[in-house]
Image (tube, rainbow, N blue to C red):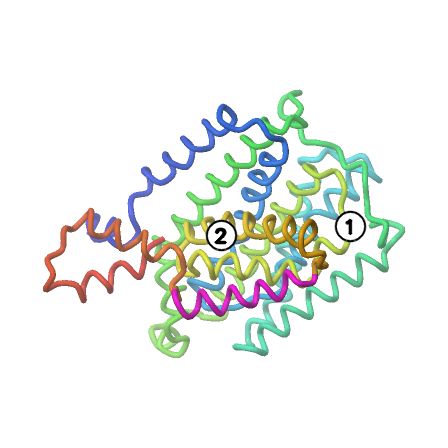
Amino acid sequence: MKKLDVLLYGSRKKPIAALLGMVLVMPFIISSPYIFTILILIGIYSIITIGLSLLVGYAGQISLGHAAFFAIGAYISGVLTVKYSFSPWLAILIGMIITFISAFLIAIPVMKLKGSYLALATMAINIIIYILLLGLSDYTGGASGLGGIPPLSIFGLSLESQVLFYYFVWFIVSLVIVFSSNIVRSHIGRILRSIHDSEVATETLGANVSKYKVAIFALSAVFASLAGSLYAHFISFIAPPTFYINFSILLLIMVMVGGVHSIWGAMIGTAVMMALNELIRFVGHNYLNISGEIEIVVYGAIIVIVMIFMPKGLIHPISKLRFKKLTHTPKNETSKQKLFSEKGV
Protein backbone atom coordinates (compact mmCIF):
# COMPACT_ATOMS: atom_id res chain seq x y z
CA MET A 1 0.00 0.00 0.00
CA LYS A 2 2.86 2.38 0.78
CA LYS A 3 4.43 1.63 -2.61
CA LEU A 4 1.11 2.34 -4.31
CA ASP A 5 0.81 5.62 -2.42
CA VAL A 6 4.23 6.69 -3.70
CA LEU A 7 3.24 5.79 -7.25
CA LEU A 8 0.02 7.73 -7.08
CA TYR A 9 1.20 10.81 -5.24
CA GLY A 10 4.98 10.74 -5.15
CA SER A 11 7.33 11.02 -2.21
CA ARG A 12 6.42 13.61 0.40
CA LYS A 13 9.99 14.32 1.47
CA LYS A 14 11.96 14.69 -1.76
CA PRO A 15 9.88 17.47 -3.41
CA ILE A 16 9.75 19.47 -0.17
CA ALA A 17 13.50 19.02 0.32
CA ALA A 18 14.13 20.13 -3.27
CA LEU A 19 11.89 23.17 -2.81
CA LEU A 20 13.56 24.20 0.44
CA GLY A 21 16.97 23.72 -1.16
CA MET A 22 16.04 26.04 -4.03
CA VAL A 23 14.60 28.59 -1.61
CA LEU A 24 17.75 28.57 0.51
CA VAL A 25 20.19 29.12 -2.37
CA MET A 26 18.23 31.78 -4.28
CA PRO A 27 19.50 34.76 -2.21
CA PHE A 28 23.07 33.68 -3.00
CA ILE A 29 22.33 33.63 -6.74
CA ILE A 30 19.95 36.58 -7.16
CA SER A 31 20.50 40.11 -5.91
CA SER A 32 17.83 42.01 -7.89
CA PRO A 33 15.10 43.48 -5.61
CA TYR A 34 12.68 43.24 -8.54
CA ILE A 35 13.21 39.49 -8.97
CA PHE A 36 12.97 39.00 -5.20
CA THR A 37 9.62 40.78 -5.25
CA ILE A 38 8.40 38.41 -7.96
CA LEU A 39 9.60 35.36 -6.00
CA ILE A 40 7.81 36.57 -2.88
CA LEU A 41 4.60 37.17 -4.84
CA ILE A 42 4.87 33.70 -6.40
CA GLY A 43 5.02 32.28 -2.88
CA ILE A 44 2.05 34.35 -1.69
CA TYR A 45 -0.06 33.48 -4.73
CA SER A 46 0.92 29.81 -4.45
CA ILE A 47 -0.83 29.69 -1.08
CA ILE A 48 -4.06 30.67 -2.85
CA THR A 49 -3.62 28.37 -5.84
CA ILE A 50 -2.87 25.37 -3.62
CA GLY A 51 -6.24 25.98 -1.94
CA LEU A 52 -7.87 26.37 -5.34
CA SER A 53 -6.29 23.10 -6.43
CA LEU A 54 -8.03 21.35 -3.53
CA LEU A 55 -11.33 23.01 -4.40
CA VAL A 56 -11.26 22.84 -8.20
CA GLY A 57 -8.96 19.93 -8.98
CA TYR A 58 -9.91 17.51 -6.22
CA ALA A 59 -13.46 18.48 -5.27
CA GLY A 60 -14.44 19.66 -8.77
CA GLN A 61 -15.96 22.97 -7.59
CA ILE A 62 -15.03 26.02 -9.66
CA SER A 63 -14.49 29.46 -8.14
CA LEU A 64 -14.08 32.83 -9.80
CA GLY A 65 -14.24 34.72 -6.53
CA HIS A 66 -11.16 33.87 -4.49
CA ALA A 67 -9.76 37.36 -4.97
CA ALA A 68 -12.56 38.39 -2.58
CA PHE A 69 -11.14 36.25 0.24
CA PHE A 70 -7.66 37.48 -0.63
CA ALA A 71 -9.06 41.00 -0.16
CA ILE A 72 -10.73 40.17 3.15
CA GLY A 73 -7.46 38.96 4.63
CA ALA A 74 -5.53 41.94 3.27
CA TYR A 75 -7.99 44.59 4.42
CA ILE A 76 -8.67 43.13 7.85
CA SER A 77 -4.92 43.05 8.50
CA GLY A 78 -4.53 46.53 7.07
CA VAL A 79 -7.45 48.17 8.86
CA LEU A 80 -6.79 46.56 12.25
CA THR A 81 -3.07 47.42 12.26
CA VAL A 82 -3.29 50.91 10.73
CA LYS A 83 -6.46 52.28 12.32
CA TYR A 84 -6.66 50.29 15.57
CA SER A 85 -2.99 49.46 16.28
CA PHE A 86 -3.56 45.72 16.50
CA SER A 87 -0.64 43.32 16.49
CA PRO A 88 -0.12 42.17 12.86
CA TRP A 89 -0.17 38.52 13.95
CA LEU A 90 -3.47 38.97 15.79
CA ALA A 91 -4.86 40.82 12.77
CA ILE A 92 -3.86 37.94 10.48
CA LEU A 93 -5.54 35.43 12.79
CA ILE A 94 -8.72 37.53 13.02
CA GLY A 95 -8.75 37.83 9.23
CA MET A 96 -8.53 34.06 8.81
CA ILE A 97 -11.30 33.45 11.35
CA ILE A 98 -13.64 36.02 9.79
CA THR A 99 -12.87 34.65 6.33
CA PHE A 100 -13.60 31.09 7.43
CA ILE A 101 -16.95 32.07 8.95
CA SER A 102 -17.90 34.18 5.92
CA ALA A 103 -16.85 31.53 3.40
CA PHE A 104 -18.60 28.80 5.37
CA LEU A 105 -21.88 30.74 5.41
CA ILE A 106 -21.53 31.69 1.74
CA ALA A 107 -20.73 28.12 0.73
CA ILE A 108 -23.87 26.62 2.27
CA PRO A 109 -26.14 27.98 -0.51
CA VAL A 110 -23.49 28.52 -3.20
CA MET A 111 -22.10 24.96 -3.15
CA LYS A 112 -25.55 23.68 -4.13
CA LEU A 113 -24.97 25.22 -7.56
CA LYS A 114 -23.03 23.56 -10.36
CA GLY A 115 -21.08 24.51 -13.45
CA SER A 116 -21.58 27.98 -14.88
CA TYR A 117 -24.09 28.88 -12.16
CA LEU A 118 -21.47 28.21 -9.49
CA ALA A 119 -18.89 30.25 -11.43
CA LEU A 120 -21.30 33.19 -11.72
CA ALA A 121 -22.22 33.00 -8.03
CA THR A 122 -18.58 33.12 -6.92
CA MET A 123 -17.94 35.95 -9.38
CA ALA A 124 -20.83 37.85 -7.79
CA ILE A 125 -19.15 37.43 -4.38
CA ASN A 126 -16.03 39.04 -5.81
CA ILE A 127 -18.05 41.97 -7.19
CA ILE A 128 -19.84 42.51 -3.87
CA ILE A 129 -16.58 42.59 -1.91
CA TYR A 130 -15.06 44.95 -4.46
CA ILE A 131 -18.00 47.35 -4.12
CA LEU A 132 -17.75 47.19 -0.32
CA LEU A 133 -14.04 48.05 -0.49
CA LEU A 134 -14.92 51.16 -2.47
CA GLY A 135 -17.95 52.08 -0.38
CA LEU A 136 -16.50 51.66 3.11
CA SER A 137 -13.95 54.38 2.46
CA ASP A 138 -13.80 55.51 6.11
CA TYR A 139 -12.13 52.19 6.89
CA THR A 140 -10.64 50.96 3.61
CA GLY A 141 -9.59 54.28 2.10
CA GLY A 142 -11.91 53.66 -0.85
CA ALA A 143 -10.43 54.11 -4.31
CA SER A 144 -7.40 55.85 -2.81
CA GLY A 145 -6.38 52.68 -1.02
CA LEU A 146 -4.96 52.03 2.43
CA GLY A 147 -1.29 52.68 3.18
CA GLY A 148 1.08 52.56 6.11
CA ILE A 149 0.54 48.85 6.82
CA PRO A 150 3.39 47.78 9.12
CA PRO A 151 5.80 44.95 8.25
CA LEU A 152 5.75 41.70 10.19
CA SER A 153 8.27 40.90 12.89
CA ILE A 154 9.19 37.69 14.71
CA PHE A 155 10.59 37.85 18.26
CA GLY A 156 11.62 41.44 17.68
CA LEU A 157 13.23 40.67 14.31
CA SER A 158 11.62 42.78 11.58
CA LEU A 159 10.77 41.03 8.32
CA GLU A 160 10.98 44.30 6.44
CA SER A 161 14.07 42.96 4.67
CA GLN A 162 13.15 41.32 1.37
CA VAL A 163 15.39 38.33 2.01
CA LEU A 164 13.93 37.63 5.46
CA PHE A 165 10.36 38.02 4.23
CA TYR A 166 11.19 35.80 1.25
CA TYR A 167 12.36 33.02 3.57
CA PHE A 168 9.33 33.48 5.81
CA VAL A 169 6.82 33.33 2.95
CA TRP A 170 8.31 30.18 1.48
CA PHE A 171 8.40 28.58 4.91
CA ILE A 172 4.65 29.21 5.12
CA VAL A 173 4.23 27.80 1.59
CA SER A 174 6.04 24.62 2.67
CA LEU A 175 3.69 24.22 5.64
CA VAL A 176 0.67 24.72 3.37
CA ILE A 177 2.02 22.08 0.96
CA VAL A 178 2.52 19.53 3.74
CA PHE A 179 -0.91 20.25 5.23
CA SER A 180 -2.65 20.04 1.83
CA SER A 181 -0.76 16.90 0.81
CA ASN A 182 -1.89 15.19 4.00
CA ILE A 183 -5.48 16.10 3.16
CA VAL A 184 -5.11 14.70 -0.36
CA ARG A 185 -3.69 11.41 0.95
CA SER A 186 -6.27 11.07 3.71
CA HIS A 187 -9.80 9.72 3.77
CA ILE A 188 -10.98 13.28 3.10
CA GLY A 189 -8.92 13.43 -0.08
CA ARG A 190 -10.43 10.19 -1.36
CA ILE A 191 -13.92 11.55 -0.73
CA LEU A 192 -13.08 14.82 -2.52
CA ARG A 193 -11.87 12.90 -5.59
CA SER A 194 -15.01 10.80 -5.44
CA ILE A 195 -17.12 13.99 -5.36
CA HIS A 196 -15.20 15.24 -8.38
CA ASP A 197 -15.97 12.03 -10.29
CA SER A 198 -19.61 11.66 -9.23
CA GLU A 199 -21.51 13.40 -6.45
CA VAL A 200 -24.40 10.96 -6.77
CA ALA A 201 -22.15 7.92 -6.38
CA THR A 202 -20.41 9.52 -3.40
CA GLU A 203 -23.73 10.16 -1.67
CA THR A 204 -24.73 6.57 -2.39
CA LEU A 205 -21.66 5.43 -0.47
CA GLY A 206 -22.91 7.37 2.57
CA ALA A 207 -20.72 10.48 2.44
CA ASN A 208 -22.22 13.88 3.23
CA VAL A 209 -21.25 15.60 -0.03
CA SER A 210 -22.51 19.05 0.99
CA LYS A 211 -20.47 19.00 4.20
CA TYR A 212 -17.22 18.23 2.37
CA LYS A 213 -17.86 20.78 -0.38
CA VAL A 214 -18.59 23.54 2.13
CA ALA A 215 -15.57 22.61 4.26
CA ILE A 216 -13.09 22.56 1.37
CA PHE A 217 -14.47 25.87 0.05
CA ALA A 218 -13.99 27.46 3.47
CA LEU A 219 -10.48 26.00 3.81
CA SER A 220 -9.42 27.32 0.40
CA ALA A 221 -10.82 30.73 1.39
CA VAL A 222 -8.72 30.71 4.58
CA PHE A 223 -5.62 30.03 2.48
CA ALA A 224 -6.53 33.04 0.35
CA SER A 225 -7.06 35.18 3.46
CA LEU A 226 -3.65 34.20 4.84
CA ALA A 227 -2.07 35.09 1.50
CA GLY A 228 -3.91 38.42 1.49
CA SER A 229 -2.57 39.33 4.93
CA LEU A 230 0.98 38.44 3.91
CA TYR A 231 0.55 40.52 0.76
CA ALA A 232 -0.67 43.54 2.73
CA HIS A 233 2.21 43.42 5.21
CA PHE A 234 4.71 42.96 2.38
CA ILE A 235 3.49 45.69 0.01
CA SER A 236 2.36 48.04 2.86
CA PHE A 237 -0.34 49.46 0.58
CA ILE A 238 -3.56 47.94 -0.76
CA ALA A 239 -6.24 49.25 -3.12
CA PRO A 240 -9.46 47.73 -4.54
CA PRO A 241 -8.26 47.22 -8.17
CA THR A 242 -5.80 44.58 -6.93
CA PHE A 243 -8.72 42.41 -5.84
CA TYR A 244 -11.01 42.67 -8.85
CA ILE A 245 -12.36 39.76 -10.92
CA ASN A 246 -9.40 39.72 -13.29
CA PHE A 247 -7.23 38.54 -10.39
CA SER A 248 -9.66 35.70 -9.63
CA ILE A 249 -9.47 34.71 -13.28
CA LEU A 250 -5.68 34.83 -13.20
CA LEU A 251 -5.61 32.58 -10.12
CA LEU A 252 -7.79 30.00 -11.84
CA ILE A 253 -5.62 30.13 -14.97
CA MET A 254 -2.53 29.53 -12.82
CA VAL A 255 -4.10 26.34 -11.49
CA MET A 256 -5.23 25.19 -14.94
CA VAL A 257 -1.86 25.84 -16.58
CA GLY A 258 0.01 23.91 -13.90
CA GLY A 259 -2.56 21.13 -13.61
CA VAL A 260 -5.78 21.28 -11.62
CA HIS A 261 -5.30 17.82 -10.12
CA SER A 262 -1.95 18.65 -8.57
CA ILE A 263 -0.77 20.76 -5.65
CA TRP A 264 2.67 20.99 -7.19
CA GLY A 265 1.08 21.78 -10.54
CA ALA A 266 -0.67 24.76 -8.96
CA MET A 267 2.70 26.10 -7.84
CA ILE A 268 4.28 25.52 -11.25
CA GLY A 269 1.37 27.28 -12.93
CA THR A 270 1.71 30.19 -10.52
CA ALA A 271 5.40 30.61 -11.29
CA VAL A 272 4.89 30.32 -15.06
CA MET A 273 1.97 32.75 -15.15
CA MET A 274 3.74 35.28 -12.93
CA ALA A 275 6.75 35.22 -15.25
CA LEU A 276 4.51 35.50 -18.30
CA ASN A 277 2.47 38.26 -16.68
CA GLU A 278 5.58 40.35 -16.10
CA LEU A 279 6.73 39.68 -19.67
CA ILE A 280 3.35 40.82 -21.04
CA ARG A 281 3.51 44.03 -19.01
CA PHE A 282 7.09 44.75 -20.04
CA VAL A 283 6.52 44.16 -23.75
CA GLY A 284 3.09 45.80 -23.76
CA HIS A 285 4.14 48.98 -21.99
CA ASN A 286 7.57 49.43 -23.54
CA TYR A 287 7.17 48.22 -27.11
CA LEU A 288 3.51 47.78 -28.09
CA ASN A 289 1.98 50.72 -26.17
CA ILE A 290 -1.05 48.68 -25.06
CA SER A 291 -3.03 48.87 -21.83
CA GLY A 292 -3.27 46.26 -19.11
CA GLU A 293 -6.67 45.14 -20.40
CA ILE A 294 -4.91 43.16 -23.12
CA GLU A 295 -3.72 40.82 -20.37
CA ILE A 296 -7.21 39.29 -20.12
CA VAL A 297 -7.16 38.55 -23.86
CA VAL A 298 -3.77 36.88 -23.50
CA TYR A 299 -4.99 34.84 -20.52
CA GLY A 300 -7.92 33.60 -22.59
CA ALA A 301 -5.59 32.58 -25.39
CA ILE A 302 -3.39 30.72 -22.90
CA ILE A 303 -6.38 28.74 -21.62
CA VAL A 304 -7.30 27.70 -25.16
CA ILE A 305 -3.72 26.66 -25.97
CA VAL A 306 -3.28 24.70 -22.74
CA MET A 307 -6.64 22.94 -23.08
CA ILE A 308 -5.79 21.87 -26.64
CA PHE A 309 -2.18 20.80 -26.28
CA MET A 310 -1.76 20.09 -22.54
CA PRO A 311 -5.22 19.50 -21.03
CA LYS A 312 -3.71 17.99 -17.86
CA GLY A 313 -1.36 20.94 -17.33
CA LEU A 314 2.40 21.32 -17.18
CA ILE A 315 2.65 18.84 -14.31
CA HIS A 316 1.52 15.92 -16.49
CA PRO A 317 4.82 15.37 -18.37
CA ILE A 318 6.69 15.63 -15.06
CA SER A 319 4.39 13.01 -13.51
CA LYS A 320 4.99 10.67 -16.44
CA LEU A 321 8.76 10.96 -16.07
CA ARG A 322 8.52 10.36 -12.32
CA PHE A 323 6.37 7.27 -12.85
CA LYS A 324 8.82 5.79 -15.37
CA LYS A 325 11.69 6.32 -12.95
CA LEU A 326 9.82 4.64 -10.10
CA THR A 327 8.36 1.67 -11.93
CA HIS A 328 10.36 1.03 -15.13
CA THR A 329 7.06 -0.14 -16.59
CA PRO A 330 7.32 -2.40 -19.68
CA LYS A 331 5.74 -1.22 -22.91
CA ASN A 332 2.83 -3.65 -22.61
CA GLU A 333 1.77 -1.93 -19.37
CA THR A 334 1.44 1.59 -20.74
CA SER A 335 -2.28 1.69 -20.00
CA LYS A 336 -1.60 1.18 -16.29
CA GLN A 337 1.14 3.81 -16.42
CA LYS A 338 -1.31 6.32 -17.87
CA LEU A 339 -3.86 5.57 -15.15
CA PHE A 340 -1.42 6.20 -12.32
CA SER A 341 0.45 9.15 -13.79
CA GLU A 342 -2.73 11.16 -14.19
CA LYS A 343 -3.21 11.21 -10.40
CA GLY A 344 -0.01 12.96 -9.37
CA VAL A 345 0.02 15.61 -6.61
Q: Amino acid at mark 2?
A: Ile
Residue 87 sits inside the magenta stretch: no
68 with respect to 238 (left or right): left
Q: Which stretch is magenta?
A: 293-309
Residue, x 78% and y 41% (percent of image)? 80
- Quick check: 46 above or below 216? above
Which residue is outermost to the front? Answer: 287
Residue, x 59% and y 72% (percent of image)? 119
Measured as percent of width and height from the top left, residue 255 is found at 49, 58
**Residue occupied by mark 2:** 50
Q: Secondary structure at mark 1?
A: loop
C-beta proximity under 8 Å, tags 1 and 2: no
188 with respect to 251 (left or right): left
Residue 34 figure quarter? top right
In the image, 308 versus 338, the foreground residue is 308
59 with respect to 1 (left or right): right
Number of labelled discs?
2
Mark 2 residue crowding within 10 angstroms, few (<14) / some (14–19) / many (20+): many
Q: Secondary structure at mark 2?
A: helix
- Quick check: 220 above or below 23? below
Residue 239 bears which disc, if any? 1
Measured as percent of width and height from the top left, residue 188 is found at 39, 58
123 with respect to 239 (left or right): left
Residue 342 bears which disc, if any? none
Measured as percent of width and height from the top left, residue 198 is found at 38, 75
